[in-house]
Image (tube, rainbow, N blue to C red):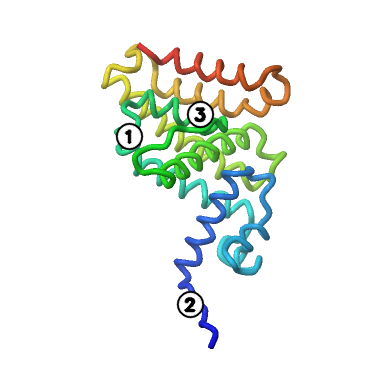
């Protein structure tokens, strides 16, 4: 006798859609993902995704809110795992630029979560630079996410200053926006910069060297 499929509650279905969308958006970016792919990953029909979120842009906005909330909650443990706020910033930049991170004590789950944070941070930053080209409905949620992320990065800089790893004289908020600006320009560099692999690493090193004591 075939097993009956367990029906998900509305909250669990919404969370499963968000989890699948987070994976897909982090892997290929907002522009490349189709809502039908999210639906197939969850095992529901495409209309079910639209019933829960209304549009692809609204789904992406919910994903950004989810990831920024997770990032804020995880900051203390992330700093502890990487040894310092400066090391965590370097790790997030490596993730955002697609470099393979070192696996932390929590194993593959921590690595995967960190990659999602880094890749979505870079994707959101690039969408803020030209939201109309992607989807006009993305302007407000992408800007909101960028401002939230800038606040988290500024807090990381302040933490690094308190710990003595980051130069005391620099403005944490200005530094956060400088770092996000470097992320948002990644697509420009990847399209035009020769020897992108080597030079991208050098750009990251220069940005982080500015922060170091």
> Quick one: SS at disc 1?
helix
Q: What element carries label 3?
A: helix
| Quadrant in which residue 139 is drawn | top right
Q: In the picture provided, is 103 more to the left or to the right than 49?
A: left
Mark earlier in primary sequence (1, 2): 2
Residue picked out by circle 2? 6
Examine the rendered structure and indicate whether residue 127 appears above or below residue 52: above
Residue at the limit of the structure toward the front, as seen here: 1
**Residue lying furthest left in this view?**
163
Q: Are marks 3 and 1 in contact (CB under 8 Å)?
A: no
Mark 1 neighbour density, 10 Å: few (under 14) some (14–19) many (20 or more): some
User: Residue 79: x percent and y percent?
Assistant: 33, 32
Task: Label 2: state its secondary structure.
Answer: loop
- The residues tagged by marks 2 and 3 sit, at their Cα atoms, a distance apart of 40 Å
Task: Tell me the CA gap for discs 1 and 2.
Answer: 37 Å
Q: Please give the residue where the numbered disc 3 appears in the rendered image.
A: 94
Q: Do the residues labelled 2 and 3 touch (CB within 8 Å)?
A: no
Q: Position of residue 122 (x, y in %)?
A: 56, 34
Earlier-in-chain disc, 2 versus 3? 2
For the point 56% across and 25% down, which residue is it?
181
Q: Which of 98 and 57 is in front in this view?
A: 98
- Where's the C terminus, which quadrant? top left
Q: How far apart are marks 3 and 1 (CA)?
A: 16 Å
Q: Mark 1 points at which residue?
A: 81
Residue 71 placement, left or right of 24: left
Q: Which residue is drawn at 64% across and 45% down?
A: 30
């Amino acid at each position: 006798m075939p097993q009956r499929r367990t029906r998900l509650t509305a909250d669990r279905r919404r969370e499963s859609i968000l989890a699948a969308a987070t994976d897909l958006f982090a892997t290929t970016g907002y522009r490349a993902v189709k809502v039908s792919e999210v639906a197939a990953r969850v095992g529901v029909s495409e209309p079910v995704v639209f019933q829960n979120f209304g549009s692809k842009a609204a789904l992406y906005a919910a994903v950004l809110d989810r990831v920024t909330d997770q990032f804020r909650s995880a900051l203390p443990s992330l700093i502890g795992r990487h040894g310092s706020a400066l090391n965590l910033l370097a790790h997030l930049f490596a993730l955002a630029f697609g470099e393979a991170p070192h696996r932390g004590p929590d194993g593959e789950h921590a690595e995967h979560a960190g990659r999602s944070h880094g890749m979505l941070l870079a994707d959101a930053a690039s969408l803020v630079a030209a939201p109309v080209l992607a989807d006009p409905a993305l302007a407000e949620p992408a800007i909101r996410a960028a401002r939230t992320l800038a606040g988290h990065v500024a807090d990381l800089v302040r933490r690094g200053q308190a710990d003595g790893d980051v130069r005391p004289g620099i403005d944490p908020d200005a530094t956060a926006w400088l770092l996000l600006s470097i992320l948002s320009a990644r697509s420009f560099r990847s399209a035009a910069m020769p020897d992108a692999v080597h030079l991208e690493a050098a750009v990251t090193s220069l940005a982080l060297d500015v922060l170091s004591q």
